Image (cartoon, rainbow, N blue to C red):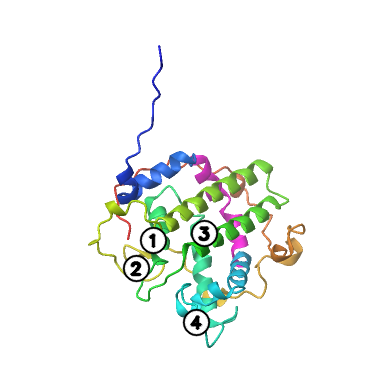
């Protein structure tokens, strides 16, 4: 007797019309669970300490190539004409963009059990195809995908080089962060690829909101503009820098190695909730 195989059903139309269904499928496929949520929450202290340095490294990389640098003045990577004023890392618009990248990276370490978290990541993808902004921005997917890879690579090296974190915590944090970044990658790609176009509602109105806002509310942590360009790539004093083995570009990354009693406790179990159906902005 031949045993029949049992499949988990995935509705194709839902993947393109229901963000919550898409997120459930992605979570299931990569086994994103409460272990990952706990790893992100308990490891947020270390990630946030890395953010100032990572932001500087990312913008140094973006300004290394003309095709990505010009987007900060033309708001598009498809424009290939001359640019009068090439910007650098001290330009006002770059310092402004650094504020939002810092807030975005901090958001990655917040509570991914809430649908709002994934809605915002989807909105980040939408905003890079000319939608949802008063001043449209058009960035080709090739640059978005490789920038996420660069961020993941930099964070992974820094986490694995930490001298105080136990190996199992390093593994858990690297895995959880990698899963979130790859889901963000999918939510970037979905706004560029043509898959599922037959299900799209061409008359659906896209709400224009300020950056960092979702459904009219600011969901990014406030960033002190005075800290937009710290005197050192990291606010952690250099004597405590544990990353002596990192490559040249990341050698200045540093994290605090001391932990309070509360921070040594494992994160409380956080169930992945299935909130009421929401519609992404």
Of the two numbered discs 2 and 4 on the same chain, state the one appearing first in sequence: 4
Q: CA distance from mark 1 to mark 3?
A: 16 Å
Q: CA distance from mark 2 to mark 3?
A: 20 Å
The structure residue drawn at horizontal position 63% and vertical position 66%, both measured from the top left corner, is 53
Q: Which residues are magenta?
A: 34-52
Q: Which of the two residues, 148 or 173, is positioned nearer the viewer here?
A: 148
Q: Which of the two residues, 95 or 185, is positioned nearer the viewer here?
A: 185
Which residue lies under the disc numbered 4? 81
Q: Is residue 269 visible?
A: no
- Is 243 left or right of 211, judged from the image as shown? right
Q: CA distance from mark 2 to mark 4?
A: 26 Å
Determine whether the residue tagged by mark 3 lies in a helix, strand or loop. Answer: helix
Determine whether the residue tagged by mark 2 lies in a helix, strand or loop. Answer: loop
- Residue 89 falls in image quadrant: bottom right
Of the two numbered discs 1 and 3 on the same chain, state the one appearing first in sequence: 1
Of the two numbered discs 4 and 1 on the same chain, state the one appearing first in sequence: 4
Residue 33, image x and y in percent? 48, 40
Which residue lies under the disc numbered 2? 132
For the residues labelled 1 and 3, say whether their Cβ atoms are less than 8 Å apart: no
Residue 80, image x and y in percent? 50, 78
Which residue lies under the disc numbered 3? 145
Looking at the magenta stretch, what is its main secondary structure?
A: helix
The structure residue drawn at horizontal position 67% and vertical position 72%, both measured from the top left corner, is 232
For the residues labelled 4 and 1, say whether their Cβ atoms are less than 8 Å apart: no
The structure residue drawn at horizontal position 69% and vertical position 61%, both measured from the top left corner, is 254
Q: Is residue 55 magenta?
A: no
- Is 230 left or right of 276, judged from the image as shown? right
Q: Does residue 167 lie above or below 51 as drawn?
A: above
């Amino acid at each position: 007797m031949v045993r029949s195989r049992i499949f988990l059903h995935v509705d194709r139309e839902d993947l393109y019309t229901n963000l919550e269904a898409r997120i459930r499928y992605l979570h299931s496929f990569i086994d994103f669970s409460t272990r990952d949520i706990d790893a992100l929450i308990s490891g947020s202290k270390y990630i946030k300490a890395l953010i100032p340095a990572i932001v500087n490294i990312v913008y140094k990389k973006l300004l290394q190539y003309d095709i990505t640098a010009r987007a900060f003045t033309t708001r598009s990577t498809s424009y290939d004409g001359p640019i009068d004023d090439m910007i650098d890392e001290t330009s006002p618009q770059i310092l402004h963009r650094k504020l939002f990248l810092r807030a975005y990276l901090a958001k990655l370490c917040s509570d991914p059990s809430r649908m709002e978290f994934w809605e915002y990541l989807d909105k980040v993808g939408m905003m890079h195809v000319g939608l949802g902004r008063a001043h449209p921005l058009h960035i080709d997917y090739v640059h978005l995908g490789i920038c996420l890879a660069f961020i993941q690579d930099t964070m992974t090296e820094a986490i694995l080089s930490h001298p105080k974190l136990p190996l199992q915590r390093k593994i858990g944090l690297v895995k959880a962060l990698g899963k979130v970044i790859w889901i963000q990658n999918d939510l970037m790609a979905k706004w560029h690829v043509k898959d599922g176009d037959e299900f799209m509602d061409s008359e659906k109105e896209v709400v224009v909101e300020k950056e960092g806002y979702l459904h009219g509310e600011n969901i990014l942590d406030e960033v002190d503009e005075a800290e937009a360009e710290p005197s050192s790539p990291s606010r952690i004093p250099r004597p405590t820098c544990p990353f002596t083995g990192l490559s040249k570009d990341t050698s200045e990354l540093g994290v605090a190695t001391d932990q309070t009693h509360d921070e040594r406790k494992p994160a409380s179990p956080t169930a992945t909730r299935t909130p009421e159906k929401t519609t992404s902005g």
